[in-house]
Image (spheres, rainbow, N blue to C red):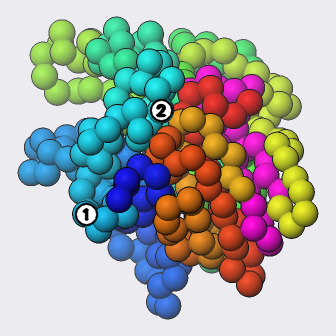
Amino acid sequence: MNVFEIPWKLVMNRLPRAPHEGGREMNRFHGSPDPEDDGYPEEWIGSDTRITGAEESGDPNLGCQKCVLPDGREIYLFEAIALDPEAALGKEHLKLIGPRTGILIKLLDFKNQLNLQTHPDRPYAKKWWDSDFGKAESWYILAKREDAAEAPYVYLGFKEGITRKDFEAGFYADDRKQMEACCHRIPVHAGDIFNVEAGVPHAVGPGCLILEVQEPTDINVIWRRKKDGTQEEQDYENERTLGCFHYDGRSFEENLKRFKITRRLLREGSGFREEVLIGTKETPYFSFTELEAGKPVPLLMTGHLQVGIVLEGEAELITETGSLHVKQADEFFVPAGVRALRLVPGEKGARVVLCHPAGVVR
């Protein structure tokens, strides 16, 4: 059996993020009959990325996802890729990115608002963290908590006229509200899509179930200033934090125009429709589409890996040499070596998000 000719089932990869609560809506998505917040508000998908502090946690591979190969072996995704990187990722992918997936997908489900933060672009990440990847990301709002104390929202982007001096005033005063007042607060609804460029301030508000697609790093730059250590160490960390933000504010309308994305048609036919949610128009680092199918449909084979998440329904993924059954909340990896792949939906159809590395879907 050639395991690179059939999609791989991905093993659920839930992560704690102390002290943050959450996970209830994710458990609901996975079909729990009595969903509750369980302290696991993140699920990392298609991941060969380790969480910050993995070594200290006692699990050096924490954050990395396992997969089940068609021959029944359950191993880490990075181990499966290493068996034949070209068959797993694609020849062009290896030239551009190397033996990494070049992408990280997450489900996020936080009960309360996260801290205001940003992430580095690639030059800044290389300078301050010696990382080849920055952390541009995007959000697809899947659902909201109906019993949340307030309507879901996000903070995203500086307001027009805000300067570093304005933001620093709140930073050095340890005044979270003053820093948030520098940013736009945006109400969100299921179906909304946002492109979160590196350097842009943002915070996910309470009650949002979000599918996030991003560059494969865990570099998070939180607003909180460093107070311990030597003065030199404090100055270093505080400058690394403040210098990571891009202080280019906009009006509310201009901000939405830049960061809120309108989906666009990729292709459609009898019984199916596929739309681009984020493409190379928004970022050169990743892309993803949503395919809704009521009848069998061939998937677009790109010569690169693909990572899929089933949002609704169920389907058979059928190749020339085998198949994989998937249902709501299942995740799967399509090796570049898969020559042809058909999605055959169940009676109630299927809705699937397909994620791609750099430069694949325009």
9 vs 353, left or right, is left
Can residue 200 be seen? no
Up-down relation of residue 219 to residue 133 (above or below): below
| Residue at position x 37%, y 54% in the image | 3
Q: CA distance from mark 1 to mark 2?
A: 22 Å
In which quarter of the view is residue 97 placed? top left
What residue would you read off at disc 2? 90
- Give yes or no for residue 109 being in the magenta stretch: no
| The one of 160 and 294 positioned closer to us in this rendering | 294
| Residue at position x 72%, y 15% in the image | 161
Q: Identify residue type, mark 2.
A: Gly
Classify mark 2: residues with Cα within 10 Å, few (<14), some (14-19) or many (20+).
many
Range of the magenta residues?
273-297
54 vs 118, left or right, is left
In x, y percent, where is residue 219?
A: 36, 31
What residue would you read off at disc 1? 73
| Residue at position x 60%, y 72% in the image | 316
Dot 2: element? loop
In x, y percent, where is residue 24?
A: 47, 74
